[in-house]
Amino acid sequence: MRLIRGLANLQALSGQATSPLAKGCVATIGNFDGVHLGHRTIINQVRDHAHRLGVPGVAMVFEPQPREFFQGPEAPPRLTGFRQKFQALIEAGIDLVLCLRFDEQFRSYSGMGFIEDVLIDGLNVRYLVVGDDFRFGCDRAGDFELLQQVGGQRGFTVENTRTVTVAGERVSSTAVRQALADNRLDHAATLLGRPYGIEGKVVYGRQLGREIGAPTANILLKRLPPLRGVYVIQAELADGRLCDGVANIGLRPTVDGRQPALEVHLFDFAGTLYGQRLNVTFRHPLRDEVKFESVAALQAQIARDFDDARQWLAKQ
């Protein structure tokens, strides 16, 4: 078991003698959007304490993310979808991911209710790693001081997360988003500890790319992405093959303009990708997303994009 979804499933699990949480856990709480170097430092703290205590390390996340619940469409773009985030957390060393639904009922929890129902009765927490500015419960009334106070009474320890900086800049999801928005892909990769990429399932599209000689694998996005435009990419296929190509990410203003999507054209590829999952890494920006006056104008620009991409790849 690597994923627990919902408070009801957590509570049902906590009553079982064979539960992986029977002996307690070391937990951390956050959005973990992007699972960047700062997050990985927190995960290392969790992993080290979990190993010392002989219990699992748990990351608690929320769907939707709290800012998405409160801000709706105005919330910042996500760096990673839930599936990609889950995989990154497990690869970084987390044993269990607890995903709780953030809704009106959950946000009404009092600080003490959250501690009792989720941390103590649900997770049987023995060690908790959170930032000293962490707030929780209705109207954000719960804080680090309350956690330490209750922990001292109920037998669990609370520790600060460690701040990570790169060249004097605090590593954060906000900083990664800004770097991507500015097309500073190398800087985003430094903050993340890896090149930025998006994973998703290929779906059927309008077949326009095939009609104009540039077939694409289409991945629909639930939210606006943190970067927009046309990029040189590398895609990892389901069978592990790596293919270079060009991708447009955004709203496709010439042909659609509503549904965010990632359209990927792979160089020298023959076959079908429908239903497969692609992991697309963004390597180099080519141009901004533009609305063209006609499909013919779009076709001509795509040909130039392909030439520019091949020239850049030849120099690498």
Image (cartoon, rainbow, N blue to C red):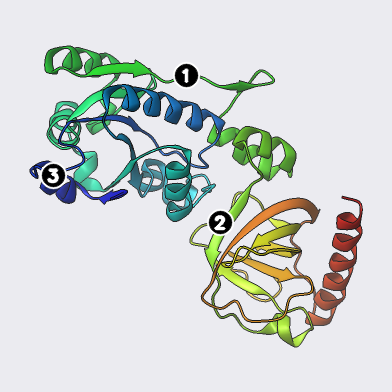
Relative placement, left or right, of 173 versus 60 is: right
For the residues labelled 3 and 1, say whether their Cβ atoms are less than 8 Å apart.
no
- N-term mark: 2 or 3: 3
Residue at point 69% right, 20% down? Answer: 167
Neighbour class for label 1 at 10 Å: few (<14), some, many (≥20)?
some
Relative placement, left or right, of 71 versus 2 is: right
Residue at point 71% right, 73% down? Answer: 254
Q: What residue did someone put label 1 on?
A: 162
Callout 2: SS: loop
Q: Nearer the viewer, mark 2 or mark 3?
A: 3
Give the distance between the C-alpha atoms of the residues marked 2 and 1, in whole angstroms: 30 Å
- N-term mark: 3 or 1: 3
Q: Nearer the viewer, mark 2 or mark 1?
A: 1
Q: What residue did someone put label 2 on?
A: 224
Q: What residue did someone put label 3 on?
A: 18
Relative placement, left or right, of 219 versus 69 is: right
- Looking at this rendering, what residue extends furthest in the bottom direction? 211
Give the distance between the C-alpha atoms of the residues marked 3 and 1, in whole angstroms: 33 Å
